[in-house]
Image (cartoon, helix red, strand yellow):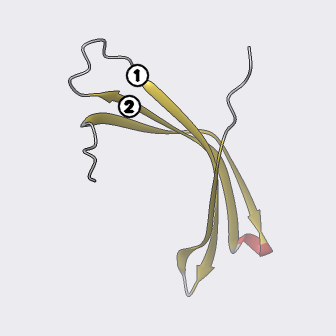
Amino acid sequence: HSTTATPSKSNVTMSQPHVQLLAGGTVAVISYVKLTQTIPIGDSAGMPVTIQQSETRVWEQRNGDWKNVHFHKSPIAKQQS
């Protein structure tokens, strides 16, 4: 059984970024909300879909270069109205 993905156009935005420098400025913790907005191609209604994820990245300066040493993401629960 195979499935075919619906072609779409996507736009990704970093929202609400927060940066913390630690360890004398050699470690950075960056947290933000990633918004992925998609409009399926061929959808006559053109209804956009937005997915929100909370992401955190930890960067460490090693030998003068910044390396991503940790990454985590979690879905953001939809709010009940």
Which residue type carries mark 1?
Answer: Pro
Q: How packed is label 2: few (under 14 Cα within 10 Å), some, or many (20 or more)?
A: some
State the quadrant of the C terminus: top right
Q: Residues within 10 Å of mark 1 (few under 14, many from 20)?
A: few
Q: Residue furthest left?
A: 42
Horizontal arrangement in the rendering, residue 2 relative to residue 25 (left or right): left
Tag 1 secondary structure: loop
Vertical placement of residue 44 versus 75, above or below: above
Q: Residue 25 location in percent, x, y?
A: 72, 70
Front residue of this view, candidates 41 and 17: 41
> Residue 44: x percent and y percent?
24, 14
Name, please, the residue furthest toward the bottom: 63
Name the residue carrying label 1.
Answer: 48
Label 2 SS: strand
State if disc 1 and disc 2 touch (CB < 8 Å).
yes
Residue at x 20%, y 23% (from the top left corner): 42
Give the Cα separation between the discs numbered 2 and 1: 5 Å
Q: How many labels sit on residues?
A: 2
Q: Which residue is mark 2?
A: 38
Residue 38 sits in which quadrant? top left
User: Tag 1 or tag 2, which sits nearer the N-term?
Assistant: 2
Three-letter code for the amino acid on which mark 2 is drawn: Thr
